[in-house]
Amino acid sequence: MTSPPPGLAPAGEPTPATLPEPATAVPSPRTDSPAVARVIVRLTTAAKYRDVHPETIADLVRREGRTTGDAAELERLVRARLHKVAALHLLTARPAALRRALDRADLDDPQARRDWCRQVLAGHFSTAERLTDLDAFYPTLFGLVPPPATVADVACALNPFTLPWLREVSDARYVGYDFNATFVALGNAFLARTHPECEIRHEEVLTDGHQVSADLALLLKTYHCMEGRRPGAGLALVDRLACRHVVVSFPTRAMNGRAAVFVPRHVEELAELARDRGWRWSRATLPSEDLVAIHKE
């Protein structure tokens, strides 16, 4: 695992003082079984999951509820699923420590800002993997698509802290989306000081009826996670995004250091979707990341 940023403690339970207010719990529709309704209430009010959007939890409960009517078994299944979906183990720095460090950080000097952002990005497994390619990442990505006016970063986690590098190649308005309220709060606190025209939204983008609109959507190393949560979810999201271009990326190596053997299958899924819809697609590869661009126009 990636070492935590210098001066920041390893991951642990964040302190309540640093957390945003949780989103309002999603009420169970009248069609929910008693077991499903009970587990939704238990998990959306549990301290361990207070950062996770209630719609994310409710969606998982309702889907797992199709396999069992026993509340105890259902809760066990959903907690196991939440461990994978929320991926809290990938954050290797304490959110509270990150927020305190942000309040003290020198963000006015461009080089100091970049150096500090690198430390923050090292605090999450996914963005830490990108550090060796970070200087080349956005030039490579924007080499695949026309200049956008708006960028939607779906399931952004700590990626808002790459804005200093994004700004080297684009002045697009950046909007991030994440179902983890801690990531949303950290990102917005950073953007308020550095890029006030940008924002992060606490939303669950996979639930029915949700729509994201932008010139360019980014799904950076999250498509395969969505597919793991619900087969077909990542592909369906790419299909329905109201965006002219969508860039999906994959790690070139799995967390165990071996080649990411799942990538060719997902790339072919995206290529087949593009062919079926009459869209173009293109691809670029960095040592740590494989990028696929879907061009809907």
Image: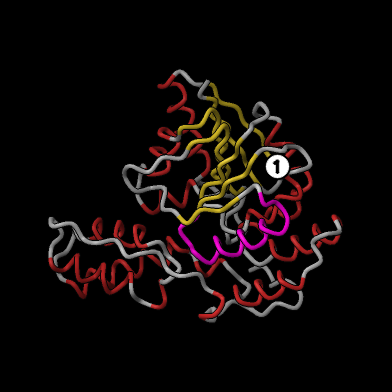
Quarter of the image for residue 236 reads top left
Q: Provide residue 42's location: percent of width, then percent of height.
A: 27, 74
**Quadrant position of residue 293:** top right
Q: What stretch is highlighted in magenta?
A: 178-196
Residue ID for mark 1: 286
Residue 12's image quarter? bottom right
The 10 Å Cα crowd at callout 1, few under 14, some 14 to 19, many 20 or more, is some
- Residue 233 position, x and y percent, is 37, 44
**With respect to residue 285, does 131 lie above or below?**
below
Residue 109, percent across and down?
A: 86, 59
- Is residue 238 inside the magenta stretch? no
Quadrant (top left, top right, bottom left, bottom right) of the N terminus: bottom right
Q: In this view, does 287 lie to the left or right of 219?
A: right
Q: Residue at x 65, y 57 (%)?
A: 127
Viewer-side residue, 275 vs 295: 295
What kind of element bears circle 1?
loop
Which residue is drawn at the image coordinates 79% and 61% (left, top)? 107
Nearer-the-camera pick, 23 or 84: 23
Q: Is the magenta stretch mostly helix, strand or loop?
A: helix
- From the viewer's perspective, tell me whether residue 22 is left or right of residue 147: left
* Residue 289 in the image: above or below residue 24: above
| Amino acid at pointer 1 | Leu
Name the residue located 68 percent from the left edge and 49 percent from the top edge: 288
236, 108: nearer the viewer: 108
